Amino acid sequence: MKNAPTLAPDASSALQVNISADLASVDVMHHGRRVTIMRNQDQDNSINPEFAQTSRKCPPFCIQPIELAPGVRTVAELEVLHFLKQISDGDTSALVIDSRTPAWVEKGIIPGTVNIPWDTLNIGKSDPATVQEILEKQLGAQRRDDFWNFDKVKTLVLFCNGSWCGQSPTTIKGLLTIGYPAHKILWYRGGMQDWESLGLTTLKPLGN
């Protein structure tokens, strides 16, 4: 997959609040249905109270660096949208992963993303059989005796709640320790807090 492909502008849009100067909205697939990601059109809208809190006990809620690990690229909303669009158009070489645990996911999700909680993919601590299944079936790794082959793995974009959240960083650092290629990992540092602060579309998990 090419990083940051150009998204075509929606010429038919008459939105007042666009995503960028030449991009009004992005259509993605979420559990088999098409969802339009756009910004909230109410210009008096304010941030979701769930993400308005400025101060949480540190540790564990400590501010993360802009560069998480060598070779891992930090991205923002437009890059996330590029990948979501590519995936929804049928590209199977990438995955946008929500690393948050269920209690956080219940508060809202980004359409087109896949939830793999950090504590189920915590290398060296989570159930080894579960970790192996995720690596093989979802990420494209191949087991060779006692070694992992990452030649055909997917490009991953991981995120959690924001720059104070350690859930996706834990997953990323764990993947790096077993040899997952750093250039195949991107990190959306702003996560849900930045996504919400920009008024971008969120959904409730299926069943809610």
Image (cartoon, helix red, strand yellow):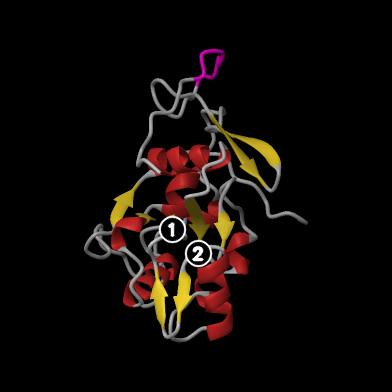
The answer to which of 49 and 101 lies nearer the viewer is 101
Mark 2 residue type: Ser
Q: Is residue 60 above or below residue 180?
A: below
Give the residue drawn at x 43%, y 28%: 7
- What segment is highlighted magenta in the picture? 10-16
Which dot marks residue 158?
1
The answer to which of 64 and 34 lies nearer the viewer is 34
Mark 1 residue type: Leu
Q: CA distance from mark 2 to mark 1?
A: 7 Å
Q: Secondary structure at mark 1?
A: strand
Coordinates of residue 72 in the picture (x, y in percent): 28, 59
Q: Residues within 10 Å of mark 1 (few under 14, many from 20)?
A: many
Q: Main secondary structure of the magenta part?
A: loop
Indicate whether residue 134 is drawn in magenta: no
Q: Residue furthest left?
A: 70
Q: Is residue 48 above or below residue 23?
A: below
Give the residue drawn at x 52%, y 59%: 98
Q: Are marks 2 and 1 in contact (CB under 8 Å)?
A: yes
Whether residue 25 sits left or right of residue 180 in the image: it is right
Give the residue drawn at x 49%, y 39%: 86
Coordinates of residue 158 in the picture (x, y in percent): 43, 58
Coordinates of residue 171 in the picture (x, y in percent): 42, 70
The answer to which of 144 and 175 lies nearer the viewer is 144
Q: Which residue is mark 2?
A: 99
